[in-house]
Amino acid sequence: LGNYLMAFGALVIFSVFSLITNKSLINNKKVAIEGQFIITATSLAQSVIEEAKNKAYDQNTIIDTVTVLKSLSPYPFKPTSPSESIPSPDTLILNTFKSASKFDDIGDYNGYTRKVYDPLSGTYMISARVCYADSLAPYDSISGKSWNKKMIVTVTSPFISIPNGLTLSYIFSYYK
């Protein structure tokens, strides 16, 4: 009877150890997989910011230099012509997004949404907001005009557990 109790006790201890080990391995794998989704989301957010970096600072700086704040576009920024309007969300067509060719300044990205499908990690929704930023505290939004604009890009996916999605910000500055 004593040997049976010892064998049963050993079996219980082994079972508990196996459950703890398996749970730990599953959690580690889950964290690693979510890390890959976050890396992809970060890359997608950066691609929108990089695309905007190639655009003019403001609708009024496309052709000429602006030297006074009152010459800049009012907030909220909106596309200034029908040719700058694109369907929402923007989707990849022939290896490009419409924003790449239709938008000509940073403000056009305000309210922009993009839908990206990745065969390995599913669908990502990307949204961008653009506002003026305080020159002394660039991460603070202001209602008036400024030589700084802040772009906030948010990426969401059902596989990212970050509340409200992954968010990247970038400050654009205009030098006259």
Image (spheres, grey):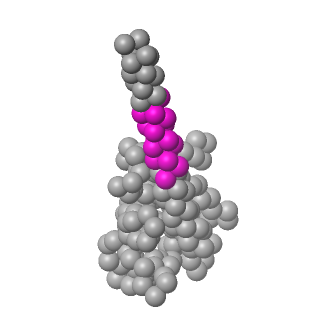
Residue 169 can be seen, yes or no? yes
Q: Quadrant of the N terminus?
A: top left
Residue 171 is left or right of residue 93, and the answer is: right
Could you say where residue 10 lies in the image, as x and y percent from the top left? 45, 22
Residue 129 can be seen, yes or no? no
Residue 105 is left or right of residue 88, and the answer is: right
In-front residue for pair 153/162: 162
In-front residue for pair 118/110: 118
Taking the view exactly as shown, the residue that stands out farthest to the left is 88
Highlighted range, magenta: 17-33
Q: Quadrant of residue 79?
A: bottom left
Residue 96 is left or right of residue 5, and the answer is: right
Q: Quadrant of residue 52?
A: bottom right
Could you say where residue 113 lies in the image, as x and y percent from the top left? 37, 67
Residue drawn at x 46%, y 34% as measured from the top left: 18
Taking the view exactly as shown, the residue that stands out farthest to the bottom is 94
Question: Magenta includes 19?
Answer: yes
Residue drawn at x 55%, y 62% as measured from the top left: 43
Could you say where residue 107 lies in the image, as x and y percent from the top left? 47, 66
